[in-house]
Image (spheres, grey):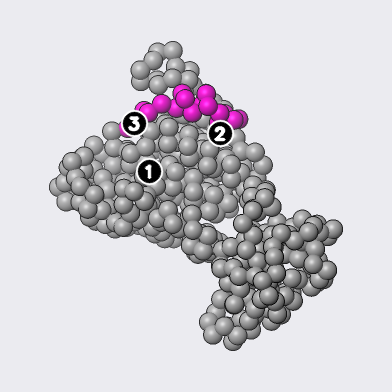
Amino acid sequence: MATALKAYRRLVVKVGSSLLTNDDGELNRDWLQGLAEDIAELANGGQQVLIVSSGAIAIGSRTLNMNRRRARLEDLQAAAAVGQVQLAHQYQELLGGLGIAAAQILLTPDDTENRRRFLNARGTLSRLIDRGVVPIINENDTVATEEIRYGDNDRLAARVAQLVMADGLVLLSDVDGLYSADPTASDDAEHLPEVHDIDESITAIAGETRSEIGSGGMATKVQAARIATHAGCATIIASGRVRRPLKALADGARRTVFHADGSPAAARKQWLAGALDVCGTLKVDDGARRALRDGSSLLPVGVIGVVGRFRRGDVVSLVDADGLEIGRGLAEYDDAEALRIAGCQSEEIAERLGYRGRAVLVHRDDLVYFGSGGVNPTTTDTGNEQ
């Protein structure tokens, strides 16, 4: 495909309900076949693609002969359970016919907001995309409540992009971008091809335009773009009202691009560097310090001390043998487990813990290295040092 999409190494594509289904909730299989062809072309070109797909409730409501506009929460959850099976099967069948494996992932807000579950979800998604599998992601509507849910797949897609450190997010729906006013209500509305700063003026003009089937409008898309761009991920809002929507986009179809400041890795490291809630300390030897300087993960063999009480997913300070803070990261083990595996080779972790855990104590994607000069540690010694 053209350079417009080739620029993104890892791409999250959100598909709206109004594209996947007809007015009566029947799946538009021909359109989905075109999308599958787009995905296969990107994947075969070396790009990693994740799909956040709406449509389960609309499809399930049709199967159950249910009016989803009048349905109660438990009815919608039942419809989601029925529709999700059918939707995942269609993706699996169409992508499989093009030589691409698919996997189904259902997420709740806790999976992206809770640090431990965040690491678990990201680990699963990373393993899938590293193996060339296209994850098909949706909110777990069968267990979500009105009070604790994403509410729309625009924001879910943005959280997924943040989760996997994607550098591109495409929101496909029935609109072709952001306008200066609601184009359905104003003849003077002007299309905005680029947005460099999502300020109050951009938020104000987003409005509340809604499709007939989807739950999100332009306001939710701009909110999603804010989440993604803050995480270093450029966001594109484009229409999917063609059979090959990604190909059309790559060939120059109208869109609005929300530009990100920096890369996903830089945004994540900036957040880690400024984290105020540092829960513990890992002291490393000179070999580990040099490995961290060169961009490697922190292996257990390089850890010579564990201080503080922390859980998996907490921010920990990394200090050198002299006690100077040289970095920070998210712990892959809690403090008790870290004490047991400190100094051991990765292949010895299973023997020490009694189960096969992760090979690293802090993964390089969750680590920021400050430099060899070090700074004063920000944690206090709680007497839990090995």
**Image quarter for residue 354?**
bottom right
Residue 14, given in percent of the width and then of the height, sits at: 43, 44
Q: Which residues are magenta?
A: 195-211
Residue 120: x %, y % from top left? 50, 64
Tell me which residue sits at (42%, 31%) in the image.
218
Q: Would you say the residues marked 2 and 3 are in contact, meaning their CB atoms lie under 8 Å apart?
A: no
Q: Is residue 310 magenta?
A: no
Residue 275 x/y as whole percent: 64, 53
Of residues 309 and 91, the one nearer the viewer is 309
Estimate the spatial distance between the alpha carbons at disc 1 and disc 2, rounded to whole Å: 19 Å
**Is 356 on the left or on the right of 269, as rendered?**
left
Query: In the image, is residue 98 above or below residue 34?
Result: below
Residue 108 can be seen, yes or no: yes
Q: Residue 333, can we see it?
A: no
Which amino acid is tagged 1?
Asp
Q: Which residue is mark 2?
A: 258
Indicate which disc, 1 or 3, sits on the residue closer to the N terminus.
1
Q: Percent x, y for residue 35?
A: 41, 45
Look at discs 1 and 2 and give the one toward the viewer: 1
- Considering depth in this image, is 174 or 345 the residue closer to the camera? 345
